[in-house]
Image (cartoon, rainbow, N blue to C red):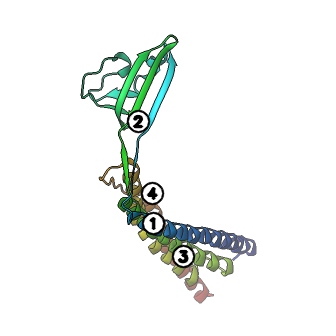
Amino acid sequence: MNSKIKQNINTAGTVGYVVSIIIIICLIAGMVAVAIGTVSAGLVAKQDINVTVETQIDVDAGKGALDKLKGFIKTDDGEDISEIFNLPDGTKITVNDKDLSEFAVTETENGVKVSTKTNPVEFTMGKIIGALVVSFIYLGCLTAMFYMIKYLMKALKKCDTPFCDSVIKSMQRFGWSLIPVIVVSPICKSLWGSVASGSNVMDLSLNLGGLLVLAVVFVLTLVFKYGAELQQQSDETL
């Protein structure tokens, strides 16, 4: 292999090796912090403490301000709130997908005053502990993945050619380490979304980006395997 190309591969491997170690240290620190948070939440849970949060917003605006609210605030029947001042009882109002328990519009000398209050969101320790446990598992999966990246970078910084067994095996291990991350990531995101919204419904979604990266890694592994076979055949011919 050209010495300059080999040097560039080794340099990239060295830089990647150092960066992966730094990220692993940060992830381990994060796991420690989450573990401490989980234990603390467990101690609080024994006291049977629940937290309820309500958000109240008051806005003073000029006379033309309500026109700019069109498309931003809607009632449950889709009618523009800027044209409604006397709402029927039971009308459901949402702002950015957040239900409002109170909504009042009053005229002032300078324009209008809008007062809103969101429905209460209850944070239970059980849900928070569950989300923290899954977060700990997710960080553990990320740590394992970056360990595989570290081994791959170590192989690249020492190799004479990227088409060697150590590099190919490290790429395979990295690919397999991606699978737990792809599986746990949407679960973790959904749990924290459920905690933040106070809902008991989990909105799981497929991690298409992670699946694409996984497919690319395994395809590259096959390409490197083929390159290694060609190189071996070339060496035997020589």
Front residue of this view, candidates 140 and 209: 140
Q: Spatial distance from mark 3 to mark 4, Cα to Cα?
A: 19 Å
Q: Position of residue 50 (x, y in %)?
A: 38, 55
The amino acid on which the numbered mark 4 sits, given as a three-letter code, is Gly
- The residue sitting at the top extreme is 109
Q: 120 above or below 128? A: above
Q: Which residue is mark 3?
A: 148
Query: Callout 2: 10 Å neighbours few (<14), some, many (20+)?
Result: few
Q: Earlier in the sequence, mark 4 or mark 1?
A: 4
Q: Spatial distance from mark 1 to mark 3, Cα to Cα?
A: 14 Å
Q: Spatial distance from mark 4 to mark 1, Cα to Cα?
A: 9 Å
Q: Secondary structure at mark 1?
A: helix
- Residue at the spot 52% in from the left edge and 12% down from the top edge: 110
Q: Secondary structure at mark 4?
A: helix
The amino acid on which the numbered mark 3 sits, given as a three-letter code, is Met
- Give the foreground label among 2 and 3: 2
Front residue of this view, candidates 187 and 180: 187
Q: Secondary structure at mark 2?
A: loop
Residue 179 is left or right of residue 5, and the answer is left
Q: Position of residue 145 (x, y in %)?
A: 51, 72
Q: 23 above or below 63? A: below
Q: Earlier in the sequence, mark 3 or mark 4?
A: 3
- Give the foreground label among 1 and 3: 3
